[in-house]
Amino acid sequence: MSTKLGAIQAEALKVFDIKYFGDAQGVTFTGSNMLLDGDSIYLIKGEEESVWSDSGAKEDVNRILDAARKNGS
């Protein structure tokens, strides 16, 4: 992962007040990662082109819907 992308992700976590990782500097994300916080869902993506494609977005939505169905929401 490029240092620039990692810094952008860390800054985004700070802006949204997401503290799951403590100080997010140096935390590396790959693929598509989902965080649930109360009634918010955050998707944190790596730099792979596949996670930014239409099919990657559809996979994200399906993961969210599948999780909701399993939890009876």
Image (spheres, rainbow, N blue to C red):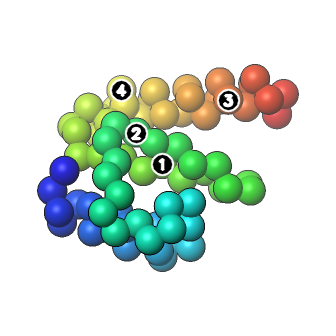
Q: Which one is in front, 35 or 21?
A: 21
How far is the residue under mark 1 from the one under mark 4? 15 Å
Q: Quadrant of residue 23?
A: bottom left
- The residue at which mark 4 appears reads as 55
Q: Are marks 2 and 1 in contact (CB under 8 Å)?
A: yes
User: Does 13 sit left or right of 39 as displayed?
Assistant: left
- Left or right: where 52 falls relative to 65: left
Closest to the camera, between mark 4 and mark 3, is 3
Mark 1, mark 4: which one is toward the viewer? 1
Residue projecting furthest to the right: 72
Q: Is residue 69 left or right of residue 65?
A: right
Give 28 or 51, whichever is nearer the viewer.
Answer: 28
Image location (x, y in percent) of residue 49: 21, 37
x 73%, y 55%: residue:
39
Q: CA distance from mark 1 to mark 3?
A: 14 Å
- Mark 4 and mark 3: Cα distance apart in space: 18 Å
Does 36 sit above or below residue 4? Answer: above
Dot label at residue 67: 3
Residue where numbered disc 2 is placed = 32
Disc nearest the viewer among 4 and 2: 2
